[in-house]
Image (cartoon, rainbow, N blue to C red):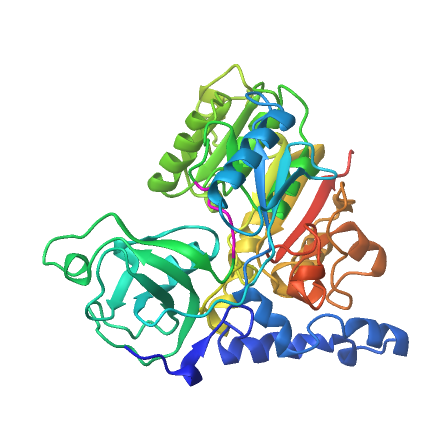
């Protein structure tokens, strides 16, 4: 299996989006041309997506790994010591050890800083893996047998192999040679021979132990899950922006896999109740497992569809519907559907096109799919607004860079609900929203956006607040009447 250099790529050097999606997003880079704006505002708008090169960063993981600490079980300093020692163990014998330090603003977040992309010479023999496996390796994982697609003939246990990702899903399982478009992600030690990986039975276990990755991300996914939770910085920020009071009842409308729900429960010091909604039972099980691992008892995970969570018309038989609002002391009161104005605190991390996720190795989402998400987002936001009580707070977030799902969605809420106002998102870690996408300058300054169009030219020069996944956060309040 010889490498074709013309078809071999490295992280951060290619755009993982479909060409039609790139064209769709690039058309958004000069929205001022559709309006009669002053020249200086037109120039300001050019920062949206200056070139296709902006999207190359989506194929590169963030240089910073962020780990949230459950402060009810460990102090930030105790967790700092434990994670630092783990980094020393993982990087023993290497020329450097990643720096570990508390985040400068978020009191329950640790930052692990690596060097980022490195130059690595590929080994002669190859292992080809699928995109999901490759993405996990770029974030610090090993190569396990289910992710292996092809192996050079003659590979034996203990041999150094180069690991490549099949970007277009064209490598057949059991392949001995693959000349399609692929990405080199590092070298590792073969832990199983080729014949063991492709037996008739279902292979299992570790296939390749990564030794010299092109991106030196630490492996912390299963490390001390009783008090540590791997979570992207903007996701952690959402819960701090919502920041409910103790003993509050909080509605998390699209809660899986439970990162934000468990964070909110932790911020309330184990008091109150977080109602975590998801329409998939498997995801509900995942939320419950995460809560149990972290020792959080104030989460109620419920299988339900949040597009149907609101009682639009109250029943004529009043005995059917309780007049008691959801509260932490009444388990039956926590069950959906809910009447309007039932919650003071609501989080809506909406289903989205997910075009801000990193690393993306080759996305399949087309323009038609991307344009379908605002429909469901408007339905969910409509329910959230109606469920919010006067004086209450609603936080809306997505992990995409598409303005229709972000700034333009905020504008839709403000245009359609006179009793809703946009409020500032604090603490402020991201940059302001995109101009000329529906919001005025004051409104843009109230929301926060993270993503490739705001990164500096080299991730090596960036900081933990800028080198993140693409993300958007807005906060609303319902006017008191």
Q: Residue at x 82, y 71 (%)?
A: 44
What is the x, y in percent for residue 161?
33, 64
In the rendered image, the vertical position of residue 305 relative to residue 156, given as above or below: above
> Does the magenta portion include 422?
no
In the rendered image, the vertical position of residue 286 relative to residue 136, given as above or below: above
Q: Main secondary structure of the magenta part?
A: loop
In the rendered image, the vertical position of residue 231 relative to residue 361, given as above or below: above
Q: Residue at x 55, y 43 (%)?
A: 231
Q: Nearer the viewer, residue 298 or 162?
A: 162
What is the x, y in percent for residue 36?
85, 78
403 with respect to 9 (left or right):
right
What is the x, y in percent for residue 303?
39, 36
Q: Nearer the viewer, residue 238 or 108?
A: 108
Does the image show residue 346?
A: yes
Quadrant of the rendered image containing residue 132: bottom left
331 with respect to 251 (left or right):
left
What is the x, y in percent for residue 154?
19, 68
64 with respect to 181 (left or right):
right
Number of numbered discs overlaid on the protein picture: 0
Q: Residue at x 42, y 82 (%)?
A: 5
Q: Nearer the viewer, residue 440 or 240?
A: 240
In the rendered image, the vertical position of residue 182 relative to residue 260, given as above or below: below
Does the image show residue 382?
A: no
Quarter occupied by the C terminus: top right
Quarter occupied by the N terminus: bottom left
């Amino acid at each position: 299996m010889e490498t074709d250099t013309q078809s071999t790529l490295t992280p951060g050097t290619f755009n993982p989006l479909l060409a039609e999606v790139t064209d769709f997003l690039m058309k958004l880079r000069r929205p001022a041309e559709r309006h009669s704006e002053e020249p200086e505002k037109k120039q300001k708008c050019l920062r949206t997506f200056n070139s296709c090169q902006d999207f190359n960063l989506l194929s590169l993981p963030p240089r910073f790994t962020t780990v949230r600490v459950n402060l009810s079980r460990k102090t930030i300093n105790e967790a700092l010591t434990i994670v630092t020692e783990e980094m020393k163990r993982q990087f023993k014998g290497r020329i450097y050890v990643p720096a570990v330090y508390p985040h400068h603003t978020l009191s329950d977040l640790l930052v692990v800083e690596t060097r980022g992309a490195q130059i690595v010479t590929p080994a002669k023999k190859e292992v080809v893996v699928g995109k999901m496996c490759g993405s996990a390796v770029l974030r610090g994982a090993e190569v396990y047998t289910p992710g292996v697609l092809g192996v050079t003939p003659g590979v034996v246990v203990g041999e150094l192999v180069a690991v490549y990702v099949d970007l277009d899903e064209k490598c057949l399982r059991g392949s001995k040679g693959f000349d399609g478009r692929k990405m080199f992600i590092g070298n590792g030690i073969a832990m199983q021979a080729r014949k063991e990986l492709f037996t008739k039975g279902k292979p299992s276990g570790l296939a390749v132990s990564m030794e010299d990755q092109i991106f030196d991300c630490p492996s912390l996914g299963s490390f001390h899950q009783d008090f540590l939770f791997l979570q992207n910085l903007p996701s952690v920020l959402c819960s701090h922006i919502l920041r409910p009071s103790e003993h509050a009842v909080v509605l998390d409308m699209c809660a899986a896999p439970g990162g934000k729900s468990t964070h909110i429960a932790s911020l309330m010091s184990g008091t109150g109740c977080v109602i975590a909604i998801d329409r998939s039972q498997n995801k509900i099980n995942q939320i419950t497992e995460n809560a149990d691992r972290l020792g959080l008892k104030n989460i109620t995970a419920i299988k339900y569809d949040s597009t149907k969570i609101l009682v639009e018309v109250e029943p004529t038989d009043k005995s059917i519907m309780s007049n008691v609002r959801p509260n932490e002391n009444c388990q039956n009161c926590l069950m959906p559907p809910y009447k309007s104005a039932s919650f003071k605190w609501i989080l809506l991390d909406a289903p989205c096109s997910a075009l801000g996720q990193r690393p993306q190795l080759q996305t399949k989402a087309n323009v038609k799919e991307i344009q379908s998400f605002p429909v469901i987002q408007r339905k969910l936001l409509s329910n959230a607004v109606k469920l919010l009580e006067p004086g209450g707070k609603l936080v809306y977030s997505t992990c995409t860079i598409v303005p229709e799902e972000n700034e333009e969605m905020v504008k839709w809420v403000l245009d359609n609900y006179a009793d809703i106002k946009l409020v500032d998102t604090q603490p402020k870690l991201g940059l302001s929203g995109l101009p000329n996408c529906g919001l005025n300058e004051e409104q843009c300054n109230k929301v926060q956006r993270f993503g490739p169009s705001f990164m500096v030219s080299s991730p090596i020069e960036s900081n933990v607040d800028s080198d993140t996944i693409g993300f958007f956060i807005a906060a609303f309040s319902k006017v008191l009447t």
